[in-house]
Image: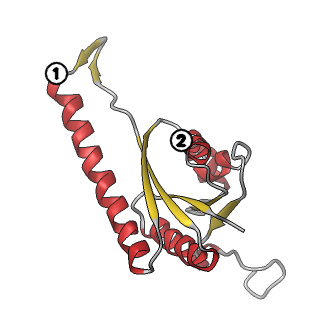
Amino acid sequence: MFQRILVPVDGSELSTRAAKTAIALAKEQGATVVFLHVTMPYVPQYAGEVPMIDSTSEKLYEQRMAEHSKDILDTVERVALAEGIQSERAIEINTHPDEAIAATVLVHRCDLVVIATHGRGAVARFFMSSVTTRLLPRCSVPVLVYRDESMVAPAIGTEDD
């Protein structure tokens, strides 16, 4: 059913668990997994209206982000390799991870996205937003949202109310 599964990873334990779920699904489906890490672009610091930047600041930032992305992607690729699953990697630079994810779906011809949600409450989502929430209306393929069991709210009308 699924041939190419996109898995955005941010280096958190939760996204690693979502990647493991995607790998198990890929094994069952005979699919390839595409791991994506999205980084933020370099933003120079300002003092008043004058940018405080030299030629090495941006290069150093890009080098550190590339190393960080490589470490994150290496971790999940090792898990895929141990399970005998083919994987690819993608790194995108974008201030809007949901846009980068939706674009990567098209570029890599993915037919499913498996993404972790950190399960923030309504107030936190209002201030911080949610990549997953913003991705859902713009994604052209099904999205499987991985949630941790600790995020489950008690049922209404239970003794815990």
The mark found on residue 39 in the picture is none
**Is the residue 149 above or below the residue 40 in the image?**
below
Question: What's the residue type where badge 2 is placed?
Answer: Ala
Residue at (22%, 41%) from the top-left corner? Answer: 63
Query: How far from the left and from the top, in percent, is residue 61?
Result: 24, 37
Q: Which residue lies furthest to the right in this view?
A: 157
Of the two numbered discs 1 and 2 on the same chain, state the one appearing first in sequence. Answer: 1
Scheme of image coloration = secondary structure
Question: What's the residue type where badge 1 is placed?
Answer: Asp
Q: Nearer the viewer, mark 1 or mark 2?
A: 2
User: Does residue 68 appear left or right of residue 152 in this picture?
Assistant: left
**Is the residue 70 above or below the residue 81 in the image?**
above
Secondary structure of the residue carrying tag 2 is helix
Secondary structure of the residue carrying tag 1 is loop
Label 2 crowding class (10 Å Cα cut-off): few <14, some 14-19, many 20+? Answer: many
Residue at (23%, 45%) from the top-left corner? Answer: 64
Q: In which quarter of the image is the C terminus?
A: bottom right
**Is the residue 26 above or below the residue 51 in the image?**
below
- Which residue is tagged 1? 54
Query: How far from the left and from the top, in percent, is residue 160?
Result: 73, 84
Query: How far from the left and from the top, in percent, is residue 109?
Result: 61, 49
Query: How far from the left and from the top, in percent, is residue 110?
Result: 62, 54
Q: Which residue lies furthest to the bottom in this view?
A: 159
Q: Toward the viewer: 125 or 93? A: 93
Q: Find the distance from the CA under tag 1 to the CA under tag 2.
A: 28 Å
Q: Quadrant of the N terminus?
A: bottom right
- Which residue is tagged 2? 100
